[in-house]
Image (spheres, grey):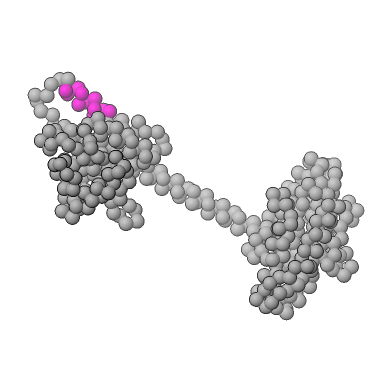
Amino acid sequence: MVAMHTKPNDLLELIDKIEDLGNFQDRIDSPFNLSQIWQTFLADICNLIDIDVCALFLVAEDTQEFALKYVTPEDQGAICREEVAVQIECGIFSWIINRRQPALIPALVFKNQKSLVMLPLATMKKTLGVACVLTSIKESFITHETLKLLAILAKQCSLVIENTFLYEGLKKKHESLEKANGEIRILSITDALTGCYNRGYLNQHLPQEIKRSLRYRHPLAVALCDIDHFKKVNDTYGHLCGDMVLKRFVQRIAQVVRQDTDWLARYGGEEFLLVLPETGVQNACVLAERLRNRVSQEEIATEEGPISITASFGVTGFDSVDGSAGISAEAMINAADRYLYQAKKAGRNKVVGGSFLDV
């Protein structure tokens, strides 16, 4: 409470300071961050009292201990930690924190009879931290009004810090939710065993590829590939080895095709559909032949020993068709399946392809 003998000018100056401190939040850009809060806090402290050192300790969420966050000058961190540790040991620190009011006490570690102003940073919900201000001013020269102003500053700073923590917490939850949703979306379109796209992705995106190719009269090809005699692999070596063969088969295809354009989806048990945008049927057959050679020439290492496999390919597509042509995904796959049947009939480990319109 201001004494009755306070001069009018002093009273007006005090009111201006109170109003200025009440606008603490308005002087910080949104969204708030601790670094900017600290700089604004320091500026306000310097307007109220001469400081030698100022340190901010915040309560760590995991340990609930007071951890040093900022200190000015920066080389005073170690002695500030030591000062707080001694104040805790003496019981003064906990008394000040529980009281939730600024306190003026002698510094115990700093030399030359320094005064220490401790400002608890707390809201109605919890204690956030404490600001320690070291000053050369003697205790008797720090007025009651100054402590009141420091209390107002501590309260305003506490509210802004709490809002910052709330914002950061909500942001992390939002990011975690977005990440989880992204992972769920990826899982929903991915074949769990092989890592390529699944049938659901194929059903949704192949019609889009066809529609886009027809609209711009760009070529599009698909290759339906089947691992030859895959049932024999399962029967001979077991399903675990069969699963390994499927994984390695997909990996070898992924190493050859264009990563940013082509995509592979698991169509059935050991059948996969390779979609090749911007690719004519002839070039698609050349690519399929490269894949066939690679699959047949490289053994697959398994726990049961190396396994050799072959694959058959049925390739089809169109080079330039009027956008009004009614080409469906089902028709494209059926055409590729008929070419695949011809490859199997010819002895397997072969590539057979042709235009979609010629089937």
Residue 215 location, quadrant: top right
Query: What residue is at 68 percent from the left and 72 percent from the top?
Result: 301
Whether residue 301 appears in this view of the structure is yes
User: Residue 102 in the image: x percent, y percent?
Assistant: 19, 41
Q: In this view, does 202 lie above or below 72?
A: below
Query: What residue is at 82 percent from the left and 60 percent from the top?
Result: 289
Q: Is 291 one of the magenta-colored residues?
A: no
Q: Is 14 one of the magenta-colored residues?
A: yes
Residue 158 location, quadrant: top left
Which residue is nearer to you in this view: 1 or 36? 36
The residue lying furthest to the bottom in this view is 236
Relative to 282, is 96 on the left or the right?
left
- The N terminus - image quarter: top left
Relative to 9, is 286 on the left or the right?
right
Query: What residue is at 21 percent from the left and 26 percent from the top?
Result: 15
Q: In this view, does 171 lie above or below 36?
A: below
User: Residue 250 in the image: x percent, y percent?
Assistant: 70, 62
Q: Main secondary structure of the magenta part?
A: helix
Q: In this view, does 193 lie above or below 128?
A: below
The boundaries of the magenta stretch are 10-20
Query: What residue is at 49 percent from the left and 51 percent from the top?
Result: 176
